[in-house]
Amino acid sequence: MTDTKAEITKRLAVLVGLEVSWVSHAGDMLTMQFGPQRRHTLRGREREDGAWALHVQCDWRIERDGRAASSREDLRGADEKAHDTATRLHGMLVGQRPIKVEKLSAYDTGGMVIVLSRGYRLEVVPDGIEDDEDWRFFAPGIDAAHLVIEGGKVAAESFD
């Protein structure tokens, strides 16, 4: 049986010291990229993405100095609301001075906290619904297994 906390900690350790390089959304899914932007081809189309990507489909919140800055609820509802939230988050975390990953911690329940510079913090809290993807972490454009958390546990596909 996989040690969820240890696997998350091991895989996400590559983020420490990297800058947040993009923040966006797809529906109510938060998407973040870390590290320098690089070009690659996906399904025959040229793309530019960060070295690492995090897609969060469960509960999350971003805080600054202990105060809520945004949460999953801010991406729910009208497309315009979600777009405005993503634009605001991108401006906060990418559009100003660089925000870097300082440290991270993981939980046995598949959740994690990424501590960022300048007082920012991202907390991800899985829903715990079996066979429902909570979040995934991967290197865009690289043919390697994604770390996928489903129902608060590391999914088997994370080792393909």
Image (spheres, grey):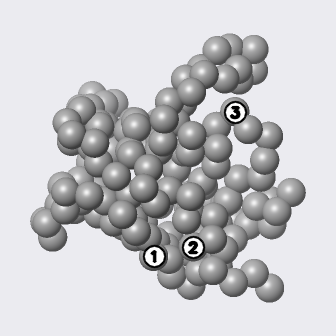
Count residues near mark 2 (Cα–Cα under 10 Å), then give few for <14, some for 14-19, many for 20+.
some
Q: Quadrant of the N terminus?
A: bottom right
Front in this rendered view, residue 110 or 93: 93
Front in this rendered view, residue 16 or 147: 16
Count residues near mark 1 (Cα–Cα under 10 Å), then give few for <14, some for 14-19, many for 20+.
some
Left or right: residue 31 versus residue 75 is right
Q: Amino acid at mark 1?
A: Ser
Residue under numbered circle 2: 9
N-terminal-most mark, 1 or 2: 2
Left or right: residue 77 versus residue 25 is left
Up/down of 50 relative to 127, above or below: above
Mark 3 and mark 1: Cα distance apart in space:
26 Å
Is residue 122 visible in the rendered structure shown here?
Answer: no
Mark 2 and mark 3: Cα distance apart in space:
22 Å
| Residue at 52% in and 50% down | 54
Q: Which mark is residue 132?
A: none
Name the residue furthest front: 17
Up/down of 159 relative to 48, above or below: below
Count residues near mark 3 (Cα–Cα under 10 Å), then give few for <14, some for 14-19, many for 20+.
some
Residue under numbered circle 3: 141
Q: Which mark is residue 105?
A: 1
Front in this rendered view, residue 77 or 1: 1
Front in this rendered view, residue 8 or 117: 117
| Residue at 79% in and 40% down | 143
Disc 1 and disc 2 in contact, CB within 8 angstroms: yes
**How far from the left and from the top, in percent, is residue 110?**
56, 75
Query: Is disc 2 placed on a helix, strand or loop?
Result: helix
Q: Amino acid at mark 3?
A: Gly
| Residue at 76% in and 61% down | 158
